[in-house]
Image: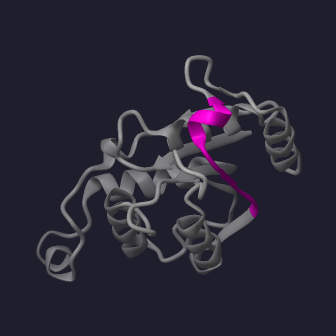
Amino acid sequence: MNVLTFAASSSRQSINKQLATYVASLIPNANVNVVDLNDFEMPIYSSDRETESGIPEQAQRFFNIIGEADVIVVSFAEHNGSYTAAYKNIFDWASRINQKVYQNKKMVLLSTSPGPGGAKSVLAQAVGSAPFFAADVKASYSLPSFYDNFDVEKGVVRNETIKEELSALVSSL
């Protein structure tokens, strides 16, 4: 099973990337492809840019990588209660290739933050809008208080209850 995983963040030390990578590792027999949104940096989307220059190669590459996956695991960082600018821009460009950005792939949507809210606002937005972009959301999960619940050095969840909940999420895939 080919699993694409990424954080909807441009932070190189992204706690969401750590969470997404961990959850993807729980999927049995998975060939995990971890991508970094920084590898898809491009101009901010505008219809004028699209008319003048077309769709950037990075957007096509991102869309193609999605197409190669069987399952997608994404963890959303929250900036001011919404998507990060980095994710939104890549998503906007990819949606110009085809509005069905997620190409009917099975998805696990996650979020986390250092605080107790666990970025629930952005996760709710992602879960709510996903069907409009051909995402087959199988599960979603918000991990609160990242540094209390995740061992950064070992790259694993340290809370046993949360570990069990996350393992159960991916068991249906």
Q: Which of 124 and 161 is in front in this view?
A: 161
Residue situated furthest left in the rendering: 52
Any part of residue 140 in sight: yes
Whether residue 159 is situated above or below residue 94 in the rendered picture: above
The percent coordinates of residue 165 (x first, y second) are 84, 45
The percent coordinates of residue 26 (x first, y second) are 77, 33
Q: Residue at x 60, y 53 (%)?
A: 116
**Numbered disc total:** 0
Residue 159 among those drawn in magenta: no
Any part of residue 102 in sight: no
Residue 144 among those drawn in magenta: yes
Residue range (magenta)? 138-150
The percent coordinates of residue 61 (x first, y second) are 39, 51
37 sits to left or right of 54: right
The percent coordinates of residue 97 (x first, y second) are 40, 71
Examine the image and state in which quarter residue 127 appears.
bottom right
Q: Which residue is drawn at 63% across and 77% down?
A: 128
Residue situated furthest top in the rendering: 153
22 sits to left or right of 43: right
